[in-house]
Image: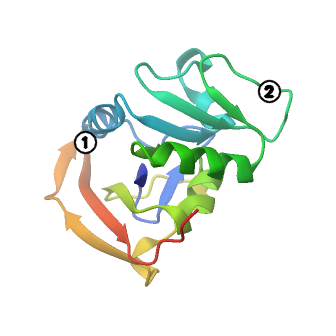
């Protein structure tokens, strides 16, 4: 399966200044435990936003950089969206692949994901980049919605959306 995993504010905002909108320890724990020992796919800026710009431990990374001279240690480097899709397809035949950002990657991958694990934050984070509004997309259905939880002073809700009209890669 191909699964996007992210958090978004009430306006579907997901980031600001190449960073997250909120400090959400419970959401981070969910991300860590969900993606641990799996494949994560991302754009170059997402990799660079990690501590020391290094890959996350105990995960296989597929990183898309449009610049063919940008190759990072410890990851599968790809340099076109077509090769990114092909690499994800080959990997997803054996195990789940988690799409982890950034905004451009999330939005380009929308037609191809099986589901979206979305942590909704019930406030406006002043975002500069946004995710696709799944509630307004007839292809997506919210199949699971958790109870509101306080996470570091923010009210969050874990949700799962299913893509009922996935396009095969």
Q: Which residue is mark 1?
A: 153
Taking the spot 39% from the left edge, 42% from the top edge, the residue there is 95
Depth check: 156 or 141 in front?
A: 141
Tell me if residue 97 comes above or below residue 134 in the rendering.
Answer: above
Foreground disc of the pair 1, 2: 2
Residue 14 percent across, percent down from the top left = 50, 52
Give the structural element (helix, strand or loop) at label 1. Answer: loop
Q: Which mark is residue 70?
A: 2
Which one is earlier in the sequence, the residue at label 1 or at label 2? 2
Taking the spot 41% from the left edge, 63% from the top edge, the residue there is 114
Marks 1 and 2, how far apart at CA: 39 Å
Look at the image and tell me whether residue 101 can be seen: no
Taking the spot 53% from the left edge, 64% from the top edge, the residue there is 112
Depth check: 119 or 74 in front?
A: 74
Give the farthest residue toward the bottom: 138
Tell me if residue 49 comes above or below residue 158 in the rendering.
Answer: above
Residue 101 percent across, percent down from the top left = 55, 45
Depth check: 20 or 125 in front?
A: 20
Contact, mark 1 vs mark 2 (Cβ under 8 Å): no
Taking the spot 54% from the left edge, 71% from the top edge, the residue there is 167
Q: Is residue 19 left or right of residue 72?
A: left
């Amino acid at each position: 399966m191909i699964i996007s995993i992210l958090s978004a504010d009430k306006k579907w905002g997901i980031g600001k200044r190449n960073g997250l909108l909120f400090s959400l320890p419970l959401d981070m724990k969910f991300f860590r435990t969900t993606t641990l020992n799996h494949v994560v796919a991302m754009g170059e800026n997402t990799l660079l936003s990690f501590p020391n710009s290094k890959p996350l431990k105990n995960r296989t990374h597929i990183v898309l950089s449009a610049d063919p001279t940008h190759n990072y240690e410890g990851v599968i480097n790809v340099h076109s969206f077509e090769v990114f899709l092909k690499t994800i397809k080959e990997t997803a035949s054996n195990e789940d692949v988690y799409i982890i950002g950034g905004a451009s990657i999330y939005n380009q991958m929308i037609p191809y994901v099986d589901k979206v694990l979305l942590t909704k934050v019930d406030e406006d984070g002043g975002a500069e980049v946004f995710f696709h509004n799944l509630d307004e997309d007839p292809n997506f259905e919210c199949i699971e919605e958790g109870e509101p939880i306080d996470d570091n002073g923010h009210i969050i809700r874990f949700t799962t959306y299913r893509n009922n009209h996935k396009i095969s890669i």
